[in-house]
Image: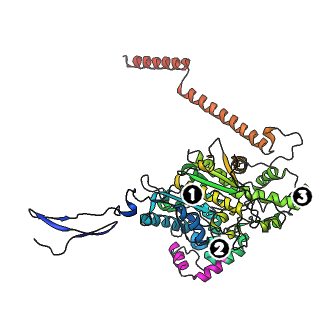
């Protein structure tokens, strides 16, 4: 049997040709000299196989409303990552209503921007080998809202993968967390979405169902959607109530989407999901003056007082963010103002406002996330960026503020882009100290991506007991410092406890405060807690006592019942006798 056309097959190294051989009616395809690698000749002689490169997938920030993958100069990426044999991938994802519009329904579920990110990661995995990428070493990182997205993806069941294979195995969070108040806002995003849907004339039709709304929205032009978006921004306060500066710019955000069942990206609130699902090494960092650029927050809040003469914190601690918000505001006042706001001048009040906002929205969530990962015995490194560049901070200092490095200052160094920090500068001239800081930041990032180990950079690991971060404030890293455990303790332990109480806080303590009485609201909390414990113990004792009485009858009662049975039997016998 002769076949003129030789057999051919495709391999990962290209096509190969073979020939046929027949024996006892069996026709076999034979392939010889099949290449499985490049020939070891020339410069490849005596060399090992080509090494695969680690991959960094970067998610841009922008409050989920703006930004793009091309925000950083390609030259800096080549200089800082490609030169270190790191494959750098920046991805775009849907933003604003196109990325996060929701009706709380499976047919209009929201989190489309997160779905884009997951799909991009899957594509990168599928094509990584074609670029020399290592599937077993993929790190996802981000800044601001991008960091919040990376934080969600790191705990999402949708990225866990089948068996033990995960979509990625390391996460870098710079100035952002999924447990920050601005990151996952399910209720307000649904409110904004309902207003936008109504503005577009695509309201829910009970007869036609949600599919009618979805089809209607698909027909709306991008121009009209942008107009609706601006409308939402203009009337944000009427949609979701009184909000602070960091909240009233995040109109459409990621949400909890349990109604998607198996397709859910975030099946519960981020804190509860994170308690169960941290599963990879973490590098987390903040700047020591996160909201230093937001001087308009001072203008809106520094001179606002209540009818009683107290400093009005409703713009800083809004009512729609906390239950029992008045008690929470009073607790924040005691924590940060020592109950004497009238003694502070305007600059000092502004400094306090920025301190509260930095802790509330960036520092406390980052420290909490680091702790939750460390409790699972995962590798965790934390840093505090304190290095100040005069050019980047010029707009802050002209207002008389000295708040340290502001939001994304570290990323401005890494990506050579001052606009990431909110600066109006398009370019910046780095001096020798700046370049050393850049080298340190890049080395830290590259070593984490490569091997999840920063000991060579002088970093100490963050642990449940040893909760430290490495300060970055000069040419050399200094000794580790405590990573804001007191701050996250206040915002994530004390305040949630106050939110559960329905009592008014006590007022100023005139005596020298004791350890347990530093916060007046702790006194009623512990009193109520003690009473509840005693009542619970009493109720349990009564229940146990009653159960014992039912299960174990007294001996005399049993004897009495036996005697009654004997008398009944004797009476029956007498009745039977003639």
| Residue tagged 1 | 446
Instruction: Judge from the rendering whether residue 55 lies leftward or rightward of residue 24; answer left or right.
Output: right
Which comes before the other along the chain, label 2 or label 1?
Answer: 2
- Where on the picture, by quarter, is residue 355? bottom right
Q: Which mark is residue 195?
A: 2
Please provide percent x and percent y for residue 59: 58, 65
225, 59: nearer the viewer? 59
Residue at image location 62% in from the left, 54% down from the top: 284
| Residue tagged 3 | 309
Magenta stretch, overall SS: helix
Rate crowding at label 2 as few (under 14), some (14 to 19) or many (20 or more) other CA atoms within 10 Å.
some
Q: Which mark is residue 200?
A: none
303, 293: nearer the viewer? 293
Residue 19 higher or lower than 488, as above or below:
below
Q: Secondary structure at mark 3?
A: loop
Q: Which residues are magenta?
A: 209-229
Instruction: Judge from the rendering whether residue 167 lies leftward or rightward of residue 491; answer left or right.
Output: left
Residue at image location 11% in from the left, 72% down from the top: 2
């Amino acid at each position: 049997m002769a076949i003129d056309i030789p057999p051919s097959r495709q391999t990962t190294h290209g096509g190969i040709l073979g020939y046929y051989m027949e024996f006892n009616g069996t026709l076999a395809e034979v392939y010889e000299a099949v290449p499985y690698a490049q020939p070891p000749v020339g410069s490849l002689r005596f060399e090992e196989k080509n090494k695969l490169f680690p991959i960094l997938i970067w998610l841009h920030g922008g409050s989920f409303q703006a930004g793009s993958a091309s925000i950083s100069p390609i030259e800096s990426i080549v200089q800082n990552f490609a030169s270190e044999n790191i494959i750098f991938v920046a991805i775009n994802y849907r933003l604003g209503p196109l990325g996060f519009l929701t009706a709380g329904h499976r047919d209009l579920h929201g989190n489309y921007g997160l779905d884009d990110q997951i799909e991009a990661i899957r594509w990168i995995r599928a094509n990584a080998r074609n670029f020399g990428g290592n599937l077993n070493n993929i790190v996802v990182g981000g800044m601001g809202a991008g960091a919040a997205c990376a934080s969600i993806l790191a705990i999402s069941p949708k990225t866990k993968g089948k068996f033990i294979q995960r979509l990625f195995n390391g996460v870098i969070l710079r100035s952002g967390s999924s447990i920050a108040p601005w990151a996952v806002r399910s209720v307000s995003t649904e409110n904004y979405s309902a207003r936008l849907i109504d503005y577009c004339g695509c309201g829910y039709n009970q007869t036609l169902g949600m599919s009618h709304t979805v089809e209607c929205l698909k027909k709306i032009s991008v121009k009209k959607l942008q107009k609706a978006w601006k409308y939402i921004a203009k009337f944000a306060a009427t949609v979701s109530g009184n909000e602070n500066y960091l909240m009233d710019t995040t109109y459409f955000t990621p949400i909890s989407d349990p109604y998607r069942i198996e397709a859910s990206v975030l099946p519960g609130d981020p804190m509860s999901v994170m308690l169960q699902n941290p599963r990879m090494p973490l590098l987390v960092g903040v700047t020591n003056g996160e909201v230093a650029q937001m001087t308009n927050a001072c203008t809106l809040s520094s001179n606002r007082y209540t009818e009683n003469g107290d400093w009005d914190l409703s713009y800083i601690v809004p009512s729609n963010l906390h239950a029992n918000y008045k008690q929470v505001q009073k607790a924040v006042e005691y924590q940060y103002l020592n109950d004497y706001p009238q003694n502070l001048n305007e600059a000092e009040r502004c400094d306090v406002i920025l301190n509260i906002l930095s802790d509330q929205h960036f520092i406390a969530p980052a420290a909490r996330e680091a702790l939750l990962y460390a409790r699972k015995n995962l590798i965790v490194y934390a840093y505090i960026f304190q290095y100040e560049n005069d050019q980047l901070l010029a707009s802050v200092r002209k207002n008389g503020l000295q708040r340290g490095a502001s939001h994304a200052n570290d990323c401005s160094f890494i990506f050579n882009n001052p606009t990431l920090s909110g600066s109006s500068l398009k370019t910046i001239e780095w001096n020798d100290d700046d370049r050393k800081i850049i080298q340190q930041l890049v080395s830290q990032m590259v070593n984490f991506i490569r091997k999840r180990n920063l000991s060579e950079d002088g970093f100490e690991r963050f642990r449940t007991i040893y909760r430290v971060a490495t300060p970055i404030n000069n040419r050399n890293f200094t000794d580790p410092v405590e990573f804001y455990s007191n701050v996250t303790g206040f915002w994530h332990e004390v305040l949630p406890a106050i939110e559960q109480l329905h009592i008014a806080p006590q007022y100023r303590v005139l005596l020298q405060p004791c350890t347990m009485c530093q916060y007046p609201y702790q006194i009623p909390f512990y009193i109520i807690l003690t009473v509840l414990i005693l009542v619970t113990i009493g109720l349990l004792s009564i229940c146990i006592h009653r159960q014992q009485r039912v299960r174990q009858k007294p001996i005399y009662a049993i004897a009495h019942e036996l005697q009654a049975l004997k008398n009944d039997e004797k009476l029956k016998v007498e009745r039977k006798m003639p």
